Image (tube, rainbow, N blue to C red):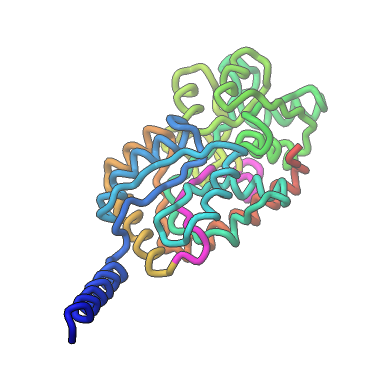
Amino acid sequence: MDRRSFCLTAFSATALAAAGARAADPFPNRPVRLIVPFAAGGGPDVQARQFAPRLGEMLGQSIVVENKVGAAGVLAAQYVTQQTPDGYTLLLGTNSQLVQKLMNPRLGFDPIGDFIPVSNMAASPTVMTVSADSPYRKLDDVIAFGKANPGKMNYGSGGIGTAAHLAGATLVSLAGLKATHIPLKGSVEIAASLLRGDTDFAFPIAGTGVPLVKGGRLRALAVTGNTRLKELPDVPTLKELLRSELAVQESWFGFWAPAKTPADIITRLHAAVAKGQLEPAVHAQFAAAGTVVATSESPQAFASFVKAENQKWADIIKLAGITAS
């Protein structure tokens, strides 16, 4: 063998060995991106950033949080569907993406078919509140006034399709009331509108509503969780009062991967999330934000949950006659 042939053979062997080593590298061997559909510093973004270092420890790689805001989570979802399905780009998926697609089927993504659910992360109900000086002391008072005065009540929300809007519309529909929805400039305006007397009742998220209730500025009449809140043990659930599963409404967010991501990578990601969620510090951080850790037993369990939620929100939107416009 001449020198040139020997060098080429040696080079080829080295290249093949390197390629084989790279192929054998366990996932992940570089940082993982988490695309968050919320503005930096707002809502679940804070919790995602708090959890990212813990998840990174479990995976042995850093987690890079990137914010892609717009269209109530639609832009972030569309972006992730266009990424390589290799586990290195994840979406912080929420029930908001389900709702937006249900309200506007023409949107260019499918929250069920375009993603593989990895694991849920956290969940939070809303709290039906009125101002502390309101004459309404329980839900029956609101319903009684609403039925005696059709069209004279209103409720506020952060916009069409938001958790507060859906909860208010569900109550109005299930109770047979006629009340006007007031879309505000954002969810941060909900409490102020109640305190000013601009709206009669509203459903802020627990993280916002509970401190104002405990501080004596708002009065809580019900919560939309499946069970009562530990912080408000005397406040009944809307499900208890209205006897309907549609009254159970929680905002949740978890990890989604692009469709066709290999099963072994999904399993690895789920195991890392589940292990990270065991940390007491994570529970404390989430509780401080008004949410509870929501652990999925498996990716398949989370997928079943997402499908069930999709059907429930479809039923709610149909019941209340909500559209995107």
Q: Is residue 147 left or right of residue 186?
A: right
Residue closest to the eye, 233 or 213: 213
Q: Can residue 50 be seen in this view?
A: yes
Name the residue at 41% across, 63% down: 266
Magenta residues?
A: 239-261
Instruction: Please identify the quarter of the rendering in which residue 179 is found.
Output: top right
Instruction: Residue 207: give x, y in percent of width and height.
Output: 46, 31
Q: In this view, does 231 lie to the left or right of 106?
A: left
Instruction: Residue 245: give x, y in percent of width and height.
Output: 63, 51
Name the image quarter holding the N terminus.
bottom left
Q: Can residue 244 be seen in this view?
A: no
Name the residue at 62% across, 36% down: 162
In this rendering, the answer to whether 13 lies above or below 263 is below
Instruction: Please identify the quarter of the rendering in which residue 171 is found.
Output: top right
Residue closest to the eye, 308 or 80: 80
Name the residue at 50% across, 66% down: 260
Name the image quarter holding the C terminus.
top right
In this rendering, the answer to whether 81 lies above or below 240 is below
Instruction: Residue 50: give x, y in percent of width and height.
Output: 34, 39
